[in-house]
Image (tube, rainbow, N blue to C red):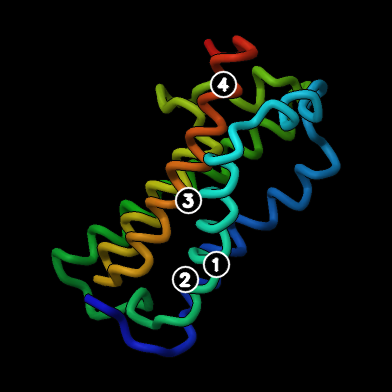
Amino acid sequence: MLGHFGFSYVGFIYLLMLFIPNIFWAKYKPAGYDDIVSNENKILLGLERVGQVLVSCVAIIFNDYDLKPFSLWSLWLIVSFILMIIYEICWIRYFNSEHTLKDFYGSFLGIPVPGASLPVAAFLLLGIYGKVIWLIISIIILGIGHIGIHLQHLKEYGTGE
């Protein structure tokens, strides 16, 4: 449950799926977003930042997430990957939109704040699949901060559906 050291190509792919859309997003932030960040809860922000560093490191330094012979346990990885694909679809939807706060924070397939909740759920399932407690702990820290901030924005600015 602690993990085996070694580079994880699956963890690396997940991080690419996470970072690439966010790099493009930096150029296409929703109107009014910069006003939102000034009101963020500092505790949630701290948890988010610590979680980001931890998840990024833990996802690639343990090779327990890499593909193994198929078994029932593989379903954790399959569901995790499906969540990451849905996350990518959410980004496509956002990039094809008018880049409003509603476009950014609006639910997708009934999933609230999908830009925050989908990758958190995917990495949690990846940690379960790999049986790496460090990723599970790291993503819980990140999830509290990241999802918490997104929900705060959603509530404060009424951008939900």
**x, y (%) of residue 142?**
48, 51
Mark 2–mark 4 Cα distance, whole angstroms, equals: 28 Å
**x, y (%) of residue 9?**
50, 78
Compared with residue 23, is residue 115 higher up or lower down, i.e. above or below?
Answer: above
Which residue does the numbered mark 3 point to in the structure image?
Answer: 142
Nearer the camera: disc 4 or disc 1: 1
Mark 2–mark 1 Cα distance, whole angstroms, equals: 5 Å
Mark sitting earlier along the chain (2/4): 2
Which residue does the numbered mark 2 point to in the structure image?
Answer: 59
Foreground residue among 156 and 19: 156
Q: Which residue occupies 60% across, 38% down?
A: 42
Nearer the camera: disc 2 or disc 4: 2
Mark sitting earlier along the chain (2/3): 2
Which residue does the numbered mark 4 point to in the structure image?
Answer: 106
Mark sitting earlier along the chain (4/1): 1
**Category of crowding for the residue at label 2, using alpha-carbon neighbours closer than 10 angstroms: few (below 14), some (14–19), many (at least 20):** many
Query: Any mark on residue 67, and which?
Result: none
